[in-house]
Amino acid sequence: MTQAPGSPGVRTPSLRRLLPHEALAAQAVWEESHLADDPGSRPRGGWSIDAWATRQCALLLGERIVGLAGIRAEPQAAATAARIALALEHRQAMNATLLVSACVDLAREAHGDLLRLFVPERAQWAVEAARAAGFIEVRSIYHMLLPADAHVPPPQQIRGIRIRPMHAGEEGAVLEALNRNWAGTWDFVPIRREMLEGDLEGQREGMLLAVDAGNDSRILATCHAVFDRSDQNPDGHPRAWISNLTVDAEQRGRGLGRTMLLAGIQYLRDRGAGSITLGVDAGDPAPLSLYQSVGFTSISTMQAWDKSLRS
């Protein structure tokens, strides 16, 4: 039985910044916690706190790292993003409360006005701590999977539009199209050049573009189909993921989004993919309906909880 803090022989949890030699131990806690709570959202290559967080701190029992709080403060972002992780054997309410409080402190240090805590729905230890700290649930993100045996029709041709892979040296045009098409969507943060180049590393052929048949440089829609045999989907099939499915505002309503989705699925299956995954804002009914109509079903949910930091 766990003794109360202050009892003889009991270590009181404490928060502090990570030391350089603790990086591996911190990463192990981060990975274990996220894998237990939301395997459906696992990014290519796994979760990395150093790659995601701009500020972080650790929860310790004695000298052992048992939890982590991290924030990501992005220029032009509407909110400072936050995530927490906690070792499975230490998921007591007090520890979760300390981690949520640490996120608030980190965000204030970064001069954030709004803190957005992302919590997997099944991580009730974190959900309860967020609610107790005055956070309000504002959105859900579904992580969806298309089974390997799902029948999907081939993409249909749309008059005046051609689908092709991106060309060498086209990064600037693709980046401009992505940011233009994503603008105005919930939780949008402009994509930076280095972020796009990281996504394209080893995955350039899967960046599919719909272009004007009469003007090959005019990008009308995008779909990034990622296939990585060295990694796995949650069901054990090779890593296959659809991202950055966007359509120019003037081209919406023509079925172009569906055509790009089907083209991405075909690209992945032609390369040996089984199941295919993607993430979608559950508050936006159009893409959610599109994915469901093709056969994608939700396998896990990430909740966004907001708290104002203004005095």
Image: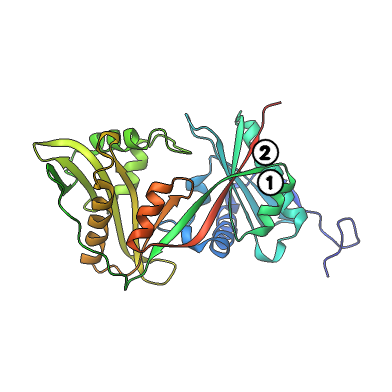
The local crowd at label 1, few if under 14, some if 14 to 19, many if 20 or more residues have their Cα within 10 Å, is many
Q: In the rendered image, is residue 65 in sight?
A: no
Which residue does the image show at 67% across and 38% down from the upper left?
104
**Name of the residue lying farthest toward the left:** 214
188 horizontally vs 9: left or right: left
User: What's the CA distance linking mark 2 and mark 1?
Assistant: 7 Å
Q: Residue 100 carries which label?
A: 1
- Residue 86 point in image, percent of width and height: 65, 57
Query: Do the residues under discs 2 and 1 have CB atoms within 8 angstroms?
Result: yes
10 Å crowding of disc 2: few (<14), some (14-19), many (20+): many
| Position of 261 relative to 276 (above/below) | above
Residue drawn at (23%, 52%) of the image: 259
The residue labelled by disc 2 is: 104
Q: Quadrant of residue 148?
A: bottom left
Identify which amino acid the numbered label 1 is placed on: Val
User: Can you give x and y, in whole percent of width and height, for residue 92 in the image?
Assistant: 75, 60
Task: Quadrant for residue 138, please give it.
Answer: top right
Indicate the secondary structure of the residue bearing disc 2.
helix
Q: Position of residue 31 (x, y in %)?
A: 54, 59
The residue nearer to you, when weighing 117 against 17, is: 117
Going by the numbered disc 2, the residue's amino acid type is Val
Q: Residue furthest top?
A: 311
